[in-house]
Amino acid sequence: MNDKFFKLPLEKQQRIINAAYKVFSQNSYKKAPMSEIAEEGGISKALLFHYFGNKKGLYLYLWINAMEMTRKAVREYKTLETNDFFEMLKRSLLSKCSLMRDYPHMYAFSLRAYYETDSEIKNAIQDNYSDVSKASEKIVFEKMDTSWFRQDIDLKTIYDEIFYAIDGYMLKKYRSNIIVPNEIEQEIIVLIDFWKKVYTQEG
Amino acid sequence: MNDKFFKLPLEKQQRIINAAYKVFSQNSYKKAPMSEIAEEGGISKALLFHYFGNKKGLYLYLWINAMEMTRKAVREYKTLETNDFFEMLKRSLLSKCSLMRDYPHMYAFSLRAYYETDSEIKNAIQDNYSDVSKASEKIVFEKMDTSWFRQDIDLKTIYDEIFYAIDGYMLKKYRSNIIVPNEIEQEIIVLIDFWKKVYTQEG
DNA sequence: CTTATATTAACCGATACGGTTAATATTGGT
DNA sequence: ACCAATATTAACCGTATCGGTTAATATAAG
């Protein structure tokens, strides 16, 4: 990792790492070509190696960067500072939308990286990893106020179902190849309101 | 396409095309290697070319085969012969589970193939394509008995949400790399019962 | 105009690709 | 046991692409 990268204009930095997020999110580590990243980012391949040393260096930077920014966004949106389930869900998802505005393919990259099996990076990645989703799931079930929920349906199933739906929704967006954060934000809000209406008791 | 392929033992046929479904579902058309398919299927690469001519031939066979089998399963499960939404949903999903039993990666392949952009196959694929999901969506909204649904929430949102959740659920299963159709079938039934309870009126 | 820095075109050896071919197993009839 | 037909593959071919380097060029700074 060459520190000169950070002296580039921010817009150029983002263009480069977004290109990398995109290519690495659409291909396995091994089959994601550096040349494709360079082209997508509008720079030469040589410059990519100049900044990040080698392919592994770039990948690891992307991974650490993704985790840092995710944690930062969760903090900024005070995601964990409520015990209202739907409020927390909304903050969590809106924080992800804000990230998506700057880094449209970061979310897809993180998922793919987490399941990456290539031995060259698997170990390096899991060292720097903290299981965000499992941690948040724990918080929901231990600290959350669940008295507003319908009593006749299983809370865990509700929780699973909502996160399946979010994943499926995002998958559809990625498949369409057109990421419009404002649109996503709006549709996410509609979905959350929908869930609140459906899963909580009237009154 | 060489007709001798069909004279192979059925188990061997399935092993080969399942290997192909797997590799093509995990890589783009261009980056899915024939050698990987051969290895995964336990045969030589030369034999693969002997049966299917070339890469494109294999891919197109997989595509046509997937559509045929999907249609056949929908028919066998009498999916469209009911106007109860949840019954239809259940039949539709269970028919997919039955396919998954023999061809675990066919569903993922179909999705990826549908969105494939490679010019060499894009045209050929869309010729042989009938939009199953859009057609079924139309049927739901035109012929379905919706009087049992809760009146206070939008039907289209319910429909979208359910299909997001199914996609997300399947995505999770594929990412875990362990496809157990019996388990999936059971969990799908739980989800459908869950939705029925949540989205229909009491009484 | 000169030096330092940013950037890239061209290149390199290695590998992986789609596809072919010639040789080897395997089968089935006699 | 033999042979012919068929099934299957190892080895090969030309080409494209890969990660990574280098030497040269463009740009900026003093």
Image: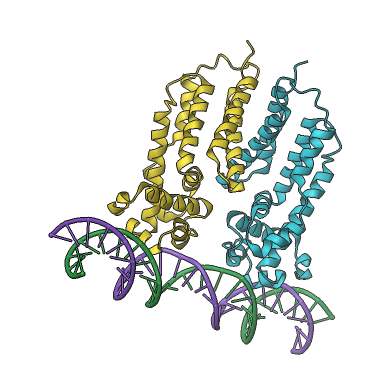
Chain colours: A cyan, B yellow, C purple, D green
Question: Which corner quadrant holds the N terminus of chain A?
Answer: bottom right
Relative to B4, is A185 on the left or the right?
right
Of A10 and A94, which appears nearest the observer?
A94
Q: Where residue A155 sits: x, y (%)?
A: 73, 28
> Looking at the picture, does residue C14 appear above or below residue B15?
below
Left or right: where B74 falls relative to A188? left
Q: Position of residue C22 (x, y in %)?
A: 29, 75
Residue A108 visible within the image: yes
On the rendered image, what quadrant is the C terminus of chain A found in? Answer: top right
Residue at the image position 80 percent from the left and 26 percent from the top: A146
Is B43 located above or below residue B80 in the figure?
Answer: below
Rendering coords of residue A166 (x, y %) = 66, 38
Q: Quadrant of residue A16?
A: bottom right
Q: Which is more toward the observer, A160 or B156?
A: A160
In x, y percent, where is residue B133? Answer: 48, 34
As drawn, which residue projects farthest toward the right?
A: A81
Q: Identify which residue is drawn at 56% across, 62% down.
A: A31
